[in-house]
Amino acid sequence: MIKVLPTVLGLAAALLTGTPAAASSGEPHPLTPWVRAVEAHEPTWVDIYWQTGRKICDAEVTVDGRKVDVGYPSNTGTYTSFSQSDRLEPGRVDRTAINVTAHYRKSAFAPIEATITYTNCRNDTEKSKSFRLTLPVLVQ
């Protein structure tokens, strides 16, 4: 049992640190590659938490997944943005909300892809970056 604890703690730390390449470059990135678990065939609002090393503006996030329907807040329609505004400051954490319905017949880890499009707030040059996330799907 003692040998298992460091392994579990190491796994938990790895899951919470997000993507090291994005973190070191200052680009926006999800805090973790995991989204909270949902029940199959039940529309559920979930959050993706983001951080950045450089200020970003005009952020829009879209999500796609095989066998997963995705909906967005009514005020944005075809995408989601941060809960506070479309900007994210370095050192701050904010969330984007999506409504997912996973169509699975048995419990699974559904891969989804979140794409964030943004500017650096100084010019209109738009950047885009995609991240593979995991959506746990539960079937009872």
Image (spheres, rainbow, N blue to C red):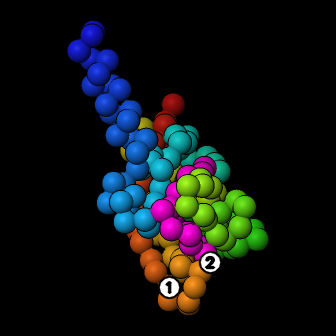
- Do the residues bearing badges 2 and 1 touch, measured as CB atoms within 8 Å? yes
* Separation (CA) of disc 2 from disc 1: 9 Å
Sequence-first disc among 2 and 1 = 2
Q: Measured from the top left, where is residue 43 in percent x and y?
A: 63, 51
Secondary-structure class at tag 1: loop
User: Dividing the image into 4 quarters, which one contains the N terminus?
Assistant: top left
Q: Main secondary structure of the magenta part?
A: strand
Residue 2 percent location from the top left of the image: 27, 10
> Where does residue 130 sit, x and y in percent of width and height?
41, 68
Q: Name the amino acid type tagged 2.
A: Asp
- Relative to 35, is 123 above or below? below
Label 2 residue SS: strand
Which of the labelled discs sits on residue 21, or is there none?
none
Q: Which residues are magenta?
A: 46-67
Q: Which mark is residue 126?
A: 1
Which residue lies most toward the right here? Answer: 75
Residue 22 spot, x, y in % from top left = 37, 62
Residue in view at x 48 percent, y 62 percent: 53
Q: Nearer the viewer, residue 89 or 28?
A: 89
* In magenta segment, residue 97: no
Residue at image mark 2? 58
Residue 69 visible in this rendered orientation of the protein: no
Left/right placement of residue 9 relative to residue 74 reads: left
Mark 2 neighbour class, 10 Å CA radius: few under 14, some 14 to 19, many 20 or more: some
Give the class, few, some or many, for how many residues have Cα within 10 Å of label 1's Cα (few <14, many ≥20): few
- Looking at numbered disc 1 in the image, what kind of residue is underneath it? Glu
Name the residue rendered at 31%, 31% in the picture. 10
Q: Nearer the viewer, residue 133 or 25?
A: 25
Residue 30 in sight from this viewpoint: yes
| Relative vertical location of residue 6 with respect to residue 45 in this rendering, above or below | above
